[in-house]
Image (cartoon, rainbow, N blue to C red):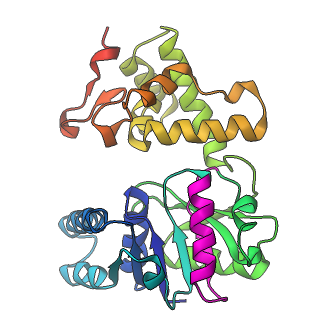
Amino acid sequence: MKNVAVIGAGTMGNGIAHTFAQFGYKVALIDITQANLDHGIATITSNLDRQVAKEKISEADKTATLENITTFTSMETGLKGVDLVVEAATENSDLKLKIFKDMDAMTEPHAILATNTSSISITKIAAVTSRPDKVIGMHFMNPVPIMKLVEIIRGYSTSDAVTDLIMETSRKLDKVPVEVNDYPGFVANRILMPMINEAIITLNEGVAGVEEIDTVMMLGMAHPMGPLKLADFIGLDVCLAIMEVLHTGLGNPKYAPCPLLVNMVLAGKKGAKSGEGFYSWANPRELVVADNFKK
């Protein structure tokens, strides 16, 4: 399995493309606009430059990685001859189902169709294809080139052979794959997102401020980043989408998203991607608590 396609050139998509390309895979990076692709390649180049500066890779490695990536705005063209497709589009169920229908129609029968979804049912996604045995979850962590974990999620019909191959492929990327079952949020977000949501509730109820909440979790629980800053980094819209999947899928009111999270997303305060969330990200090197949450 040497030819891989990645659908989506955003934060997760370009990171996944970067990682596969760095380990010698030929990667077709696909997005709907050339501007998105150009931004994705620029991000990959910048991240490779950091690896070179830290002497993690050589200039020759950087050049080889970039040469392994070809960009496409046509999904049909980009999917020709691929052995594995990793979908990394927005965490939206309807969008993912449409993409998988298209992927199923445009790829050869042997191709494995994987999704980077962090919460949506693999079984539900697989059901819109003609090959549910070849549909699987590959949930990479952000930033993909650095983080070791890949959650491997089997759908109801995912075959043992496909699961074993994807586990092996993840190890070839110098990742640590962990197989989990197909329940809303899987393991990572089933645990992480309610914690983030509870931090937002704690802020909303005035128990403590943004910096205080993050400091308690960093110094008291040895978290490398506080939950509110992490929420900004993930994207508050993504956090909201995952909480809605958990709330709907598990039917428990404890998973209801905090009204503050809902309102911030409605107001366009989506975290780092929009420049402001719980923190101001206008200058990431000098992060400050956003004005609406200052004491």
* Residue 242 location (% of width, % of height): 59, 41
User: Front-most of 233 and 212?
Assistant: 233
Q: Is residue 118 visible?
A: yes
Q: What residue is at 28 percent from the left and 70 percent from the top?
A: 56
Q: Is residue 180 visible?
A: no
Position above or below: 274 against 5 = above
Stretch of the chain drawn in magenta: 94-119
Relative horizontal placement of residue 94, taking residue 264 as reference (left or right): right
* Residue 119 location (% of width, % of height): 63, 49
Q: Quadrant of the N terminus?
A: bottom right
Relative horizontal placement of residue 195, taking residue 273 as reference (left or right): right
- Is residue 134 rendered magenta in the image? no
User: Front-most of 76 and 242?
Assistant: 76
* Residue 288 location (% of width, % of height): 24, 26
Position above or below: 163 against 188 = below
Q: In which quarter of the image is residue 236?
A: top left
Q: What residue is at 49 percent from the left and 53 percent from the top?
A: 90
Q: Quadrant of the C terminus?
A: top left
Position above or below: 82 against 85 = below
